Image (tube, rainbow, N blue to C red):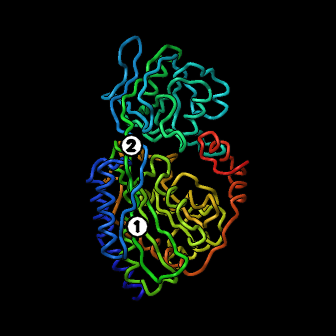
């Protein structure tokens, strides 16, 4: 097949976008839910049109089912289910009362400077522009726990009455230690203005049943010892459609499978497509696969999470220079902008593999925004995305997948990854959240 043929077919294909519509129309795709299972089955069936051995591999997880949540002061509910407050997944079902303390951005020094013992902590979801790194929600949560807080209130920095979600808990203790809720930016401002220093009560009602999730697998290409993984995650938070996080990534995996099926004779190694389950609650599905697989059999992992939100792809290459060169070669061939960064990106499904030195690229997209933007809010909806962008990026990523099959890439020692995390000031946060996998 000539370049003009496969590129033209991809740019006019509606396979990926149609699958994205299927995913967002499922409704709740929370890890362990019936909706996540429905979305996984639909993805399996879509991949089966183009690839071999399409299947689901199931595994047990800690489930979490949303109930009501509220914040009250003086015995009166000041913000509840109808007023911009939602529980953070894997918050315990609990109620706690303490004086409200606003710790601003929730930098480590903010917690050191504030008296959080026995308090309800209010913290923003972003970091200031001058700060040296992004601080993940779970790091802020566990700083609050370590400081003795009795409850955690996570205030969105994005305006528009959009409370943010996102899980708490650790791999060893999936349910968090103190109740945690997300509130809209405007709600957080009102709470800080009216109740700072006063007692407030945070209440979360939820269920924590045992549950089952699943990874979706399919593959094509020559039967080689090594393979390239092209991955995404199929689950999403229960409060929105999950269009950009990560319906678009999974839809693009399906589109890439369609394009690669027509270019199968160009593949120098096996390609395995994996749409992981339970990413949003601690990379559970990808962690399971990484623990089961012979990592030496994985040539590279190409993980799509956060694409289609902006037209320019951004590739985090984790210090694997050859992967950055591969991405740049695709950009040059198509005369299309792609940005690369050698930095570590430890918060998506490539990470359980990269942790141990497997060459991996985390592909997202540039948006010009701080943090997640519409992600993890009610506003993560299909109307924020465009078919044109999905098709353009599917073309680039299809060619990158072919390129990644063409040579073996040097592994990196886990000690090197650990040193890079230390150098980028990420290690301390990973240690406090229980995500540090290395022996010190």
Along the line of sight, the residue nearer the viewer: 127 or 260: 260
In the picture, measured across the screen, residue 21 lies left or right of residue 126, that is left
Which residue is located at x 60 percent, y 61 percent? 354
Which residue does the numbered mark 2 point to in the structure image?
210
In the picture, measured across the screen, residue 193 lies left or right of residue 385, that is right
Q: Is residue 129 shown above or below 183?
A: below
Residue 219: which quarter of the image? bottom left
Point out residue 370 in the picture as x, y percentages from the top left corner: 52, 46
In the picture, measured across the screen, residue 111 lies left or right of residue 66, that is right
Q: Element type at marker 1?
A: strand
Q: Element type at marker 2?
A: strand
Which residue does the numbered mark 1 point to in the structure image?
217
Which residue is located at x 60 percent, y 70 percent? 296
Point out residue 160 in the picture as x, y percentages from the top left corner: 38, 37
Residue 77: which quarter of the image? top left
Asked if residue 120 can be seen in this view, the reply is: yes
State the count of labels.
2
Residue 363 bears which disc, if any? none
Along the line of sight, the residue nearer the viewer: 11 or 399: 399
Q: Is residue 148 shown above or below 281?
A: above
Q: Quadrant of the N terminus?
A: bottom left
Point out residue 180 in the picture as x, y percentages from the top left corner: 46, 31
Along the line of sight, the residue nearer the viewer: 149 or 286: 286
């Amino acid at each position: 097949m000539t370049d003009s043929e496969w590129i033209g077919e991809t740019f006019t294909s509606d396979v990926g976008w149609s699958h994205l519509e299927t995913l967002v129309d499922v409704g709740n795709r929370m890890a362990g839910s019936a909706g996540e299972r429905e979305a996984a089955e639909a993805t399996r069936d879509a991949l089966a049109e183009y690839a071999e051995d399409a299947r689901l591999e199931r595994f047990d997880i800690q489930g979490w089912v949303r109930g009501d949540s509220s914040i009250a002061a003086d015995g009166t509910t000041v913000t509840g289910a109808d007023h911009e407050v939602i529980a953070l997944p894997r918050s315990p079902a609990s109620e706690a009362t303490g004086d409200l303390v606003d710790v601003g951005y929730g930098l480590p020094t903010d917690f050191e400077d504030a008296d959080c013992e026995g308090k309800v902590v209010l913290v923003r979801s972003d970091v200031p522009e001058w700060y040296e790194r992004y601080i993940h929600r779970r790091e802020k949560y566990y700083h609050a726990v370590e400081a003795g807080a009795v409850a955690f209130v996570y205030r969105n920095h994005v305006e528009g009455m959009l409370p943010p979600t996102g899980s708490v808990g650790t791999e060893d203790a999936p349910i968090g230690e103190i109740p945690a809720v997300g509130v809209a930016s405007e709600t957080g401002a009102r709470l800080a203005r009216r109740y700072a220093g006063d007692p407030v009560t945070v209440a979360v009602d939820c269920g924590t049943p045992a549950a089952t999730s699943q990874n979706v697998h399919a593959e094509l290409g020559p039967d080689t010892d090594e393979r390239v993984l092209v991955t995404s995650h199929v689950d999403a938070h229960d409060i929105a459609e999950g269009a950009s996080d990560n319906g678009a990534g999974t839809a693009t995996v399906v589109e890439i499978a369609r394009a690669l099926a027509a270019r199968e004779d160009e593949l120098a190694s096996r390609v395995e497509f994996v749409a992981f389950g339970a990413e949003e609650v601690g990379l559970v599905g990808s962690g399971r696969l990484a623990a089961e697989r012979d990592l030496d059999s994985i040539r590279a992992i190409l993980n799509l999470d956060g694409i289609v939100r902006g037209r320019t792809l951004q590739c985090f290459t984790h210090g694997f220079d050859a992967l950055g060169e591969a991405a740049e070669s695709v950009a040059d061939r198509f005369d299309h902008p792609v940005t690369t960064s050698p930095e570590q990106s430890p918060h998506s499904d490539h990470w359980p593999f990269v942790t141990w030195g497997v060459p991996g690229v985390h592909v997202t997209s540039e948006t010009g925004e701080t943090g997640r933007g519409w992600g993890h809010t009610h506003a993560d909806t299909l109307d924020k995305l465009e078919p044109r962008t999905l098709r353009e990026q599917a073309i680039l990523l299809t060619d990158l997948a072919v390129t990644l099959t063409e040579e073996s890439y040097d592994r990196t020692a886990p000690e090197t990854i650990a040193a890079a995390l230390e150098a980028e000031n990420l290690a301390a946060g990973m240690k406090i959240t229980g995500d540090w996998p290395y022996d010190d």
